[in-house]
Image (cartoon, rainbow, N blue to C red):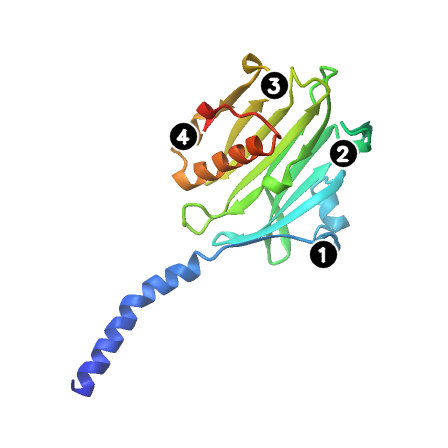
Amino acid sequence: MPQSTFIARTFCLIALCAPFSLRAQQHKTTSEMIPAPRASSVIDDSVKKAFDINSFIFRVYKYTDTSGQYFCVLTESNDSFATTDEGKPDTAHYRIRAVNLRSDNGKMTKVWEINDFILKNGLEISIWWWTRFCLFQDYDDDGLIEPIIIYGTHSTDNIDGNRIKFIIYYKGQKIALRHHDSDLDEGRHTEVDKAFHSLPQKLKDAVKAKMELMNKEGLAIFDKTTF
């Protein structure tokens, strides 16, 4: 093969591969849970004051996608001491709040937030983030991370049950799944926002996988018809 032809074909191959390489770089996303010492230096007193973050910071997640860099701050109020099912002392949380901040050259702006609290029915005694089930991933490969935030309540009555809530942020839209747990079949029900059904299949599968895992670990009872 003449050298000129070889060079021409090489440049052609590079030109064809370049858009795919560029697209892969553009769609690179990262996420991590920030250790407490580093989190306190990012979410410092000035940031807390600016966004009225007064409760105990339980976790801070950092994630980056094609739209920028974000910090998701999960807080819980420390209100009283409760007792676990094993008889051990534990802290009860009456309120939770999540604040999602975008960082642009060191300047923070709030993108969204979540607020919830225990019901005043005399049965719920605490509410907290289920961080082991929270996810910050790009499920549809569009370069944007779709956060899945999960939290739940603890009740003194297994028949009336606990509540579990899934919050999904997809392209600026807040989508929720609300589950009321119970030992009784007639006491369990799950409300799913209509928008959930139009989400990318991989994103829906990730949520359903968490439900199945909760079933397997005995943390909740989701009927098979739910997923």
Give the residue type that dot 4 points to. His
Residue receiving disc 1: 38
Q: CA separation, marks 2 and 1?
A: 21 Å
Give the residue type that dot 1 points to. Arg
Disc nearest the viewer among 1 and 3: 3
Residue receiving disc 2: 77
Q: Earlier in the sequence, mark 1 or mark 4?
A: 1
Q: Secondary structure at mark 3?
A: loop
Looking at the picture, does residue 179 appear above or below residue 1? Answer: above
Give the residue type that dot 3 points to. Ser
Q: CA separation, marks 4 and 3?
A: 25 Å
User: Horizontal and vertical percent for residue 39?
Assistant: 71, 52
Residue receiving disc 4: 197
Give the residue type that dot 2 points to. Ser
Q: Earlier in the sequence, mark 2 or mark 1?
A: 1
- Count residues near mark 2 (Cα–Cα under 10 Å), then give few for <14, some for 14-19, many for 20+: many
In the current view of this chain or complex, which residue is farthest to the bottom? Answer: 3
Q: Secondary structure at mark 4?
A: helix
Q: Are marks 2 and 3 in contact (CB under 8 Å)?
A: no
In the current view of this chain or complex, which residue is farthest to the left? Answer: 1
Q: Earlier in the sequence, mark 4 or mark 2?
A: 2
Residue receiving disc 3: 182
Q: Secondary structure at mark 2?
A: loop
In the current view of this chain or complex, which residue is farthest to the top? Answer: 186
In this orientation, which residue lies closer to the viewer: 176 or 113? 176
The reply to whether residue 199 is in sight is: yes
Residue shown at 63% from the left, 41% from the top = 131
User: Horizontal and vertical percent for residue 96?
Assistant: 69, 33
- Count residues near mark 4 (Cα–Cα under 10 Å), then give few for <14, some for 14-19, many for 20+: few
